[in-house]
Image (tube, rainbow, N blue to C red):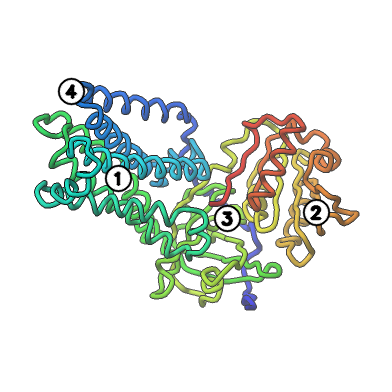
Amino acid sequence: MTARHVATPAAGSRRRGVAVPLPRDWSELAARDVWLVVAGVGVVIAAMWVRHGGPARDPLTAIGEVTALGGTYAALLGVLFASRAPWLDQVMGTDRLREIHRWLGFVSVWAIVAHSIISTLAYAGGSLGQTLPMAVTLVQTVPGMLGAVVGTGLFLLVAVSSVRAARRRLPYETWHGLHLYAYLAIAFAFLHQLTIGNDFIGDRLAVAFWIALYVVAFAPLVVYRVAWPVYLTWRHRPRLRAVVSEADGIVSLYVEGRDLDRLAARSGQFFVVRALTLREWNHGHPFSLSATPNGDYLRFTVKLFGEGTRALAALPPGTPLLLEGPYGAMHGARRTGRRLLLVAGGIGIAPIRSLAEGFAFRPGDMDLVYRTRGVRETALQRELDALAAYRGINLHYVTGQRGEPRVGEDPLGPDALRRLVPDAADRDIYLCGPNALMERARSALLALGADPHRINLELFG
């Protein structure tokens, strides 16, 4: 597909006198604060179980209750950590939240499955042969039990579809649709707790506590995944201005709208972009800003990976869009020192170019390393050359296949980075590109003695 070439303002141009606001800085919070609250709530749950006589029950019943409480709490934390609340996003980072969410999902599914089996076995008096007949009896006689069985089945469906082998075979939209069933499963779990849970029966304080947990978990999800994108779209009326080809299979999407000078976003962040058309509205694409927000337009430079991005790049100018965000913690608020090293690989140049434009620094204080396999894959080269000349950036292109004489066997290894930037380990470092490239570059920088807290990157899911 050949993208349209449309006349656009020069990238990075800014309305005179416009000061685009920045998102709120949540640096007063730390990850340990979040985990202290999580641990504190866990202690309250455990204390409530003890208060209701959990340790005095027979071992099977006690284990069944503990796995139910632990699995439900893990599921609620998973919902909260998937909410894209800005304070969580900034404190922990998108990639770390994604990894935590994945582990919480694993724990919640298997804890709830264990609860189902062990509790049924307890009702059957410990007899394995009576477990299945007892399960049928419970479904037929206990209110809410059928919903619990359906909820457990939905949890298993989500777990199976999230295994790497399954994810590779499923289109993203199908996987994401199946993943949404987890919320329905949690709703069934709540109804199950409400009808026969020991923490609910005869204890109004426990009822209020668990209801509050569900509200705290789901409210940020509703606000930031549903209400905020709708409000943002209503407020700014974003629409596609133009699609411009930048390199082989790489295009820039220019997005205009109303009052974009009031849209708080930082260089290095990303939005989830959806086209509001009948065919594309349910396809969300995470795209990084490739130019500093300027109050006139937003620019996203993207690689055309599959049908979804190609369909988006083929839309006519004027197509209305829905924006979710901004997201991401790889921005200037993480900066701690004067000198900077930016490393980009492939389409990772998008947020890196935005950061290079948005950072304040003196000439010579920034080095930018751009790794690509060939000249045809090198995007935004004219802009980078002009930006480097204007702002005094030391720009290094590492172009070619690994093993070629000018590239070497390890183009972003410790020796290569030391040759390009001798004091690389003493700088604030920002990495973006394919996960394998970022992991190699991070390992190389750590080998050179870089402070891991000064290396900023976000892995792609």
Viewer-nearest of discs 4 and 2: 4
Q: Position of residue 381 (x, y in %)?
A: 75, 60
Position above or below: 408 against 244: above
For marks 1 and 2, the one nearer the N-term is 1
Residue 237 seen in the figure? yes
| Residue picked out by circle 2 | 397
Using the rendered view, name the quadrant where residue 158 is placed: bottom left
Distance, label 4 to label 2, CA atoms, is: 67 Å
Q: Is residue 252 left or right of residue 417?
A: left
Crowding at dot 4, Cα within 10 Å, few <14 / some 14-19 / many 20+, comes out as few
Viewer-nearest of discs 3 and 4: 4
| Residue picked out by circle 1 | 218
Position above or below: 390 against 447: below
Q: Amino acid at mark 1?
A: Phe
Q: Amino acid at mark 2?
A: Tyr
Q: Is residue 341 left or right of residue 110?
A: right
For marks 1 and 3, the one nearer the N-term is 1
Distance, label 1 to label 2, CA atoms, is: 46 Å
Q: Which mark is residue 303?
A: none
Residue 85 seen in the figure? no
Do labels 3 and 2 touch, CB within 8 Å?
Answer: no
Using the rendered view, name the quadrant where residue 65 is placed: top left
Distance, label 1 to label 3, CA atoms, is: 29 Å
Crowding at dot 3, Cα within 10 Å, few <14 / some 14-19 / many 20+, comes out as many
Viewer-nearest of discs 3 and 2: 2
Position above or below: 87 against 347: above
For marks 4 and 1, the one nearer the N-term is 4
Q: Is residue 225 left or right of residue 302?
A: left
| Residue picked out by circle 4 | 53
Viewer-nearest of discs 1 and 3: 1
Q: Residue at x 31, y 54 (%)?
A: 154
Viewer-nearest of discs 1 and 2: 1
